[in-house]
Image: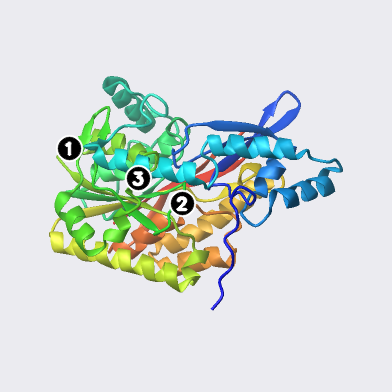
Amino acid sequence: MTTGAVKDSTQYPILRNLQFSPIKQGDDQLIVLWDPSGLSKDKLVLPLNFFFIVQHLDGEHSLQEVGALYLKRFGEFLLPSKVEQLVADLDQKLFLESPRAEAARRQARIDYRQRLSRPAVFAGRSYEADSAKLRKQIDGFFTSGEGPDFKPSEHRGKPINGLVVPTFDLKQAGPVYAWGYKELQEAQQPDVYILIGTAHAGLEHCFAVTDKDFETPLGMVPVDRPIVNRLKAVAPEFFEEDIAHQSEHAIEFQLPFLQTIIGKSFTMVPILSSFSALSLNDPTVRSSVDRFLRALRDEIGASGRSVCVIAAGELAHLGLRYGDSAPPTDFSFHRSMQRDLEMLKQVEELKPDEFAGFIQKENDQRRISGFSPIYSLLRLIQAEKGQVLRYDRGMTDQYNSTATYASMAFF
């Protein structure tokens, strides 16, 4: 049996899973790159012609081939020294798959696992770091004009099974979070919260669980040790990427709401997820997803505790930042909104396979990033119905790139 030769990474560099966004500086359009995993703290601003180079650092194109593509695209010769300097800068910033990045990744895992708890990474950046100011900020989301009305919930006092909430910037989407958390506030509150958030940097194993308690300005949120320990014993592979929690905001953004509205002590199981509706057609992915959800469902049942599953994620992503050729228009947004609400009918009716099928039929062209936590919720809970409480969108760059999101409750 023959195997393909391993390509020299210095000549065939591979860009890590980075995020990018277009920005304006005067009349110029530039691209800013950053690492959503938090392994690198740097950002890199590039002109469009250099971004063209970066897009071809996929391990399949040699630097020489990239130079030839650049000549064809821009009609000018690219000095090898410029490409080499760009690649060196990317490697220095840990933006490439390289020995430097792998060493940093190993050290980051060691450092994370030695911590007694997961710190409040986004306090003071995305929400107030002072406890009194944070409580006031959260209260303001409930009482704002966009927040939930003051009428008692029709489900008041009933056991609540699940919520869907955003992970979007709190300053924009806080009132939409509040619509979901008001239902929880008025419900018969459970003892344990299974928090499943989108892993925006991606995962190899579809799910990543951590056994760390989470710090917030309002105090410590403890993990549910019995459930987490039993889950780790039966499905240890889903704890291998626990470092993904270190810089991910999806779960952290939920905790101040829980700490503000829940009137008793509680524990949580913090989980990140990352798989698409299309990837479920891959037997390996489907098997991994099924294995984890079956194990989690068994451990929830064995605990004998009352549980609420909270799925945190966005819906559609439209615009230049997400790979579209043009910014969204009012027409394209409203068309996407109609598709979102049609898609969420499957979620309201607790039909996980139909929810996945809807996105598969669209070929996931609208990039539903919250698919994996919402799908997981539908596979885990037993409820009579779900209800869309509030739907909205947020702008993510100067070109009106848009992410949509909703709050839902399940009783």
How packed is label 3: few (under 14 Cα within 10 Å), some, or many (20 or more)?
many
Instruction: Say which mark, if any, is on residue 184.
Output: none
Q: For the N terminus, which image quadrant? A: bottom right
Amino acid marked by disc 1 = Gly
Query: The residue tagged with tag 3: helix, strand or loop?
Result: helix
Q: Quadrant of residue 151?
A: top left
Residue pictured at 31% horizontal, 64% vertical: 293
Amino acid marked by disc 3 = Ile
Q: Quadrant of residue 34?
A: top right
Residue pictured at 27% horizontal, 20% vertical: 132
Query: The residue tagged with tag 1: helix, strand or loop?
Result: loop
Q: What is the x, y in percent for residue 261?
A: 25, 36
* 384 or 217, nearer to the observer: 217
Which mark is in front, 3 or 1? Answer: 3
Q: Does residue 399 appear in this view?
A: no
Instruction: Say which mark, if any, is on residue 263.
Output: 1
User: Which comes before the other along the chain, label 2 or label 3?
Assistant: 2
Q: Which residue is mark 2?
A: 202
Residue pictured at 76% horizontal, 26% vertical: 27
Q: For the C terminus, which image quadrant? A: bottom left
Q: What distance separates the C-alpha of mark 3 from that of mark 1?
A: 31 Å
Amino acid marked by disc 2 = Gly
How packed is label 1: few (under 14 Cα within 10 Å), some, or many (20 or more)?
few
